[in-house]
Image: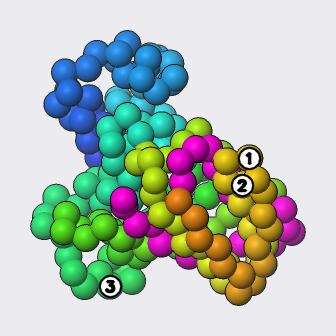
Amino acid sequence: MRNDVDERLARRLTALRVERTWSLDELAGRTGVSRSTLSRLERAEISPTAALLNKLCAAYGRTMSRLLAEVESDTEPVRVLRADEQPVWTDRASGFVRRSVSPPHPDLRAEIVEGELGPGAHIAYDGPPTPGLEHHIRVADGTLAVTVEGVARTLTEGDAMSFRLWGASAYANPGDRPVRYTLVVVAP
């Protein structure tokens, strides 16, 4: 089922590819995503997963928050963002819900994201969209398993961790109830 966010995201992803004069085949080679999947995504026939968006963001040199902010708003960035205005995106395949608490601003390097993963949910990323991204995570409720470059750590309510991301990462909920966490991402 198409929705307005998927339509705008499809248009933005197409525009980013066209701005670089890349063919679908070239983008497929850069991302490891099949040409047919990219084509269906750009026509809004499918909704992307978080892992797929991460691969595209890496190719385009953007964070996911920046891409989603570009999709959510056609106006200048807003310094005050009311709770009901904060962009929420759902990866229907994994059940990951992502709220951009502070969508990126061209003059600022940090972004705040709230994430929620349902029981048993798992998201894996091949690498960061921008190498060296600084991450700060704090779990508000539940249990979050975070794997950074092959090393797994389990965080529970109130726990926090910080790291710079250069390689693969994964987030999983090993618990039997949703996990809610805050992620602060700072561009290098």
The residue under label 3 is which amino acid type? Arg
**Residue 150's disc number:** 1
- What residue is shown at x 37% (from left), y 13% (from top)? 25
In the picture as drawn, the residue positioned furthest to the left comes out as 76
Horizontal placement of 48 versus 73: left or right?
right
- Number of residues whose C-alpha sits closer than 10 Å to that of mark 3, classed few (under 14), some (14–19) or many (20 or more): few
Q: Is residue 53 magenta?
A: no
The residue that label 3 is drawn on is 82
Q: Which residues are magenta?
A: 165-188
Whichever of callouts 3 and 1 sits on the residue coming sooner in the sequence is 3
| Quarter of the image where one finds residue 176 | bottom right
What is the CA distance from the residue labelled 2 to the residue labelled 1? 6 Å
- What residue is shown at x 59% (from left), y 71% (from top)? 162
The residue that label 2 is drawn on is 147
Q: Is residue 178 magenta?
A: yes
Quadrant occupied by the C terminus: bottom left
| Quarter of the image where one finds residue 140 | bottom right
Horizontal placement of 75 versus 22: left or right?
left
Q: Is residue 55 above or below residue 165?
A: above
Q: Position of residue 89 (x, y in %)?
A: 47, 59
The residue under label 2 is which amino acid type? Thr
